[in-house]
Image (cartoon, rainbow, N blue to C red):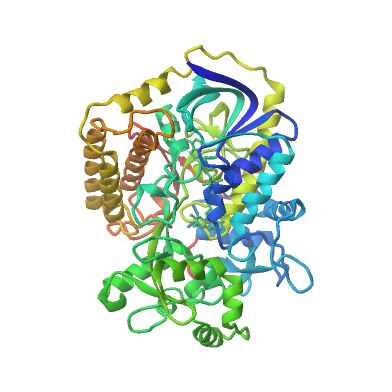
Amino acid sequence: MAQYHQFDALVIGAGGSGLMSALYASKSVNTAVISKLYPTRSHTGAAQGGISAALGNMEPDKWEWHAYDTIKGGDFLCDQDAVDILCKEAIHAVIDLEHMGLPFDRTPDGKISQRRFGGHTNNETKKPVMRACHAADRTGHMILQTLYQQCIKNNVRFFDEFQMVDMITVDGACRGIVAVELNTGELHVFHAKAVMLATGGFGKVWKITSNAHSLTGDGPAIILRKSLPLEDMEFYQFHPTGIYKMGILLSEAARGEGAVFINDKGERFMERYAPTMKDLASRDVCSRSIYKEVRAGNGIGGKDYVYLDFRPDRINKYLEADGSSRRVDAEYIETRLPDIIEFVRVYMGIDPITEPVPIQPTAHYAMGGIPTDLDARVLADEKGTVVEGLYAAGEAACVSVHGANRLGTNSLVDLIVYGRRGGIHMAEYAKQVDFKLIGDDAHKAAEDTLNAIRNNAGSEHPGQIRKELQMHMDEHVGVFRTQEKLEEALEEIHRLKERYRHIHIDDKGRRWNTDLMEAWELGCLLDLAEVTAVSALAREESRGGHYREDFPNRDDQNFLKHTMVWSDNRITYKPVRIGRYQPTERKY
Ligand SMILES: Cc1cc2nc3c(=O)[nH]c(=O)nc-3n(C[C@H](O)[C@H](O)[C@H](O)COP(=O)(O)OP(=O)(O)OC[C@H]3O[C@@H](n4cnc5c(N)ncnc54)[C@H](O)[C@@H]3O)c2cc1C
């Protein structure tokens, strides 16, 4: 049996996108949020560097420049109408957060302080522009706390530590979800007029990742299982600065403040790869450049990493060489980047104020995901058919503002802008329709799936399968890809999927059965890894985060289009919506 609940608007996920949509939906309809984590533990809280908006508080800026940078950064795969909305509404969205009480850092005259970030430029001078609004290097933490308080104030009902395991669809429309209450193991049916999937990313498909343990792509995986497509799954971002071997992120804010990459010879090698933007070129360019250095034997001690150098005396030399009059000292760096300095001290046992820091690219962000329209409504196919009652926002979604590569600070804006649009639309929709009937057995499929895992008599250990999956994805579906590597990855994923059918878990109980839930999540990771490799194999070009060594050039003739992939590995394409900017060659 399952407990039954009914809400007008139901949001799955309590990160920035989920809370923003819940906040706006709750202004006019009865709204609940379901989250497998306690809300303030969501990954949004780990976002460090900032949220971009062309406020122009420090120097001239325009939302149109922000839009062009985003489209260029995305290697012209972005839907340009969606980007215009993002960059125009970013300004209002950041001020909205300020009015809710978010403690942004300030300029001496009391405005929101802004800093430089990769790929964000003054379009006239082509130089980096200060566009990222920040609260030290804890911007995401502040956003999450602020939105959570506002949701509580607005009487949003929270179901904390409830995990969605199935979606209820009738005649192609979404009518709710089924969740496990983790504390009791009991199933709950949530009947709703409108459901928002805001379940975040799936970095745990890879081993070296900046993503938290919980980022297993539950929302997108459930979409696949409902015979709906995912968009642009081949575009996954590898952030250049993960702590060596651990993947823990050191925010691009470090380079925004003046840090640079150096190789074994002490060279500032980004000067060669991106003469204008140098260390602040877009992330895909930086990650590839690091591996090119490693391949050329310039990794530190010949190994597979380079240094990120944020020693204040060196930063001053780099700033001087760049013609900047700005200077920093240890106190300034410690104030602007307190968390990441602490991470390096704690996890590596070295002091970044006096020593350079070993870094390597780390799996970071899904540009692709659940396809949506400009109001966050989920799309069922390449023609734009809307799935009634279903919405998606945040990293789980793909409204395609990031195209083939996301610029730093643009995810937090995406959460806030499209979370808000989705929340408003859900509420309007919920006010117009009545609850539609669902069957008494709505929980049955979820119950069967979980029982099948719990009682399976196989001998395979889920943890081992997960480890092997992550290893193969790092090796074969990483920064550099080839047909051969991708085919090998797919074969391996198919073998692992077969082994997954014979898993065994030790804990047969109900309360806090993490064995069971992690085994279920592994199923999601396997499905997402498969469609990622399938989409990457089909895209025979290099664009943004997807780099094919066997097809090293961008091919607008054949591939200026979005991939739609289904669970049976079928692929279709849909055109990119081009606006003011025709695709040109990308130079940094
Ligand atoms: C270390 C790090 C630093 C970053 N720094 C920046 C930055 O400075 N600027 C920037 O723009 N971007 C940054 N990003 C990216 C950005 O933070 C994320 O893309 C964004 O926060 C994702 O937000 P979200 O709302 O989509 O999901 P998340 O914040 O990841 O939240 C997902 C939510 O879904 C819930 N959930 C998931 N599955 C289920 C399920 N089955 N049932 C119930 N609930 C579920 C979780 O409990 C959680 O509440 C960073 C990312 C990382 C990892």
Instruction: State whether residue 377 is above or below residue 472.
Output: above
Q: Is residue 229 left or right of residue 498?
A: right
Which residue is nearer to you in this view: 13 or 404? 13
Which residue is nearer to you in this view: 74 or 36? 36
Q: Position of residue 118 (x, y in %)?
A: 53, 67
Instruction: State whether residue 178 is above or below residue 471.
Output: above
Instruction: State whether residue 134 is above or below residue 167.
Output: below
Q: How many marks?
A: 0
Q: Position of residue 470 (x, y in %)?
A: 31, 49
Q: Is residue 419 left or right of residue 557?
A: right
Q: Position of residue 251 (x, y in %)?
A: 51, 65
Q: Position of residue 487 (x, y in %)?
A: 23, 46
Residue drawn at x 37%, y 20% is: 448
Q: Is residue 172 visible?
A: no
* Residue at the extreme right of the image, as rendered: 109
Residue drawn at x 54%, y 60% is: 408
Choose top left, top right, bottom left or bottom right for residue 220.
top left
Which residue is nearer to you in this view: 532 or 152? 152
Instruction: State whether residue 38 is above or below residue 320.
Output: above
Q: Is residue 182 visible?
A: yes
Choose top left, top right, bottom left or bottom right for residue 553.
bottom left
